[in-house]
Image (cartoon, rainbow, N blue to C red):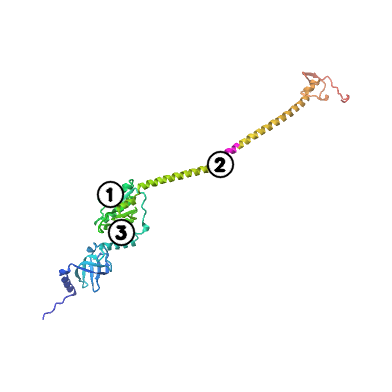
Amino acid sequence: MRTPDVLSVTQLNYYVKSLIEGDPRLKSIYVVGEISNFTDHYRSGHYYMTLKDDGAAVRAAMFRSANRNLRFVPEDGMKVIVRARVTLYEAGGQYQLIIEDMQPDGAGALSIAFEQLKRKLAGEGLFDQAHKKPIPVRSMRIGVVTSETGAVIQDIKNVVSRRYPLARIILAPVQVQGAAAASQIAEAIGTFNACSAADVLIVGRGGGSAEDLWAFNEEPVVRAVYDSVIPVISAVGHETDFTLCDFAADVRAPTPSAAAEIAVPDQREELKYIEGCACECELQLRDRLDSEENRLNRIRERLSYISPKNMIEQRMQRVDDLFSSARRNTERILDSRQSELSSVAARLDAMSPLKVIARGYSITRKNGRVVTSVSDVSRGDPLSVRLTDGELKCEVAGVERLSNLPEV
C-alpha cells in the first residue's frame, strides 16, 4: 500500500492558490457587494475591505496602483461593483479579491467624489460666508484664469470693453480640463496673488459635462480660491452647473459674461452717478455758502458793537471833546489871569518908585543900597541920588536928624 503524501500548510495553500489563479474564469470577474470593515493604509496607500451581501462575505484588497485613479474614496455601507481577480492569501489561508477597478452601484463616481470632497472642505470652513470678500466696485485690473482659445475670454473682453473700457484684462492661460488642468489653475491663482497683479479674479470656463468641469472640483483649485487674497468670481459652465470652486469663491456667476458684469461697473451708470454727485455737491456747496454768508452777517452785526474801530472812533471823539473843553477852560483861565495881571500891573504901576520920583521924590543909595535913615550914613559918605531924568553923585556934608520935627 502506497504511503500518502504529507503536505505542509504552506504547500497546501500554495497549491490551492495555483488552482484558483490558474482558472481563467477567475482572472477577471465583476462582483457587486456592500463595503464593510474598510481600512485605508495611509503609509502604503492600499485599501482593504470586506464585500458582502445578505448571504455571504469575501475579503478584498485594492492596491495603490489601482486605487489612485479612483474619483471617490470608498466608505463602509457603500454598494459598489468591482472588477477583480480571485486569489488566495497564503499567510492566512483565505481566498480574496484583488480589485482592479471600482464603481459605485447607482450614483456615479464623480457624484460621490463631489459630495465627499464637499463635506470634507465644508467641515474645514472653506465655504463659510464669513470668509467671503466683497468685490471692488471699480476694478481697474481684471485677472482671468481660463483657456486662451475658448469663447470665455472673448465674452469677458466684449462685456468689459462695453461696460467699463478703462479696465485692463490680464489673462493667465491655462488648461481647463484634463489631468494637468487643476494644477495649472491653482498655480495661476497663486501667481496673481503673489504679484498682486489684479483687483479681482475671474476663474472659469464654458459649459460641458461633469467630467469636463471636474478640474474645478479638484481640491488644489478649491484651496487656491479660498486662500486668494484677491476677490474671486467663479464662472464655471452654465447657470445650472455647480462646482466646488463656486462654493469657495467670493461670488458665483452663472456664466463668464455675468462674471464680467459683476467685475466692472456700467460706465453709463457711473456717469449718471458722477453727475448726481456733482449736482448734490453743487447744492450742498450753495447751501453751505448761504449758511456761511448768513453766519458772517450775524458776526458782522455783533462785531459792530464791539468793533475796535468804533471804540477808537469814540475815543478819538472823546479826546476831541476833552481837548475843546480844556482849550475853553484854558482860555477862560488865561482871560481871568490876564484880568488879574492887568489889575496887579495897574496897582504896581501906581506904586512904582518911578511914579513917585516923577512927582518930585528921589531915591538915595549908598554903595548900591537904598538909604532909608540918617543913621545909614556918616559925614563924608558918597551917595547916589536917583531922579526922574538921571542920578546925582553927592557926598554927605553933614547929618541932621529930624526927630524934633512934628509928626506928619
Question: In the image, residue 47 lies at what x, y percent?
Answer: 25, 66
The secondary structure that dominates the magenta segment is: helix
Q: CA distance from mark 3 to mark 2?
A: 72 Å
Against 250, residue 2 (above or below) is below
- Which of the 4 image quadrants contains residue 41? bottom left
Task: Give the class, few, some or many, for how many residues have Cα within 10 Å of label 3's Cα (few <14, many ≥20).
Answer: many
> Of the residues under marks 2 and 1, which one precedes in the sequence?
1
Pick whichever, 386 or 74, lies toward us. 74
Front position among marks 3 and 2: 2
Q: Secondary structure at mark 1?
A: helix
> Which span of residues is magenta-colored?
307-313
Q: Which residue is mark 2?
A: 301
Q: Which residue is mark 3?
A: 244
Question: In the image, residue 271 lies at what x, y percent?
Answer: 37, 45
- Which of the 4 image quadrants contains residue 300? top right
> What amino acid is found at the position of numbered circle 1 in the picture?
Gln
Q: CA distance from mark 3 to mark 1?
A: 25 Å
Pick whichever, 78 or 60, lies toward us. 78
Question: Answer yes or no: do the residues labelled 3 and 1 have beta carbons within 8 Å?
Answer: no
Q: Which residue is mark 1?
A: 154
Task: Give the class, few, some or many, for how many residues have Cα within 10 Å of label 2's Cα (few <14, many ≥20).
Answer: few
Question: In the image, residue 214 lies at what x, y percent?
Answer: 26, 58
Q: Secondary structure at mark 3?
A: helix
> Of the residues under marks 3 and 2, which one precedes in the sequence?
3
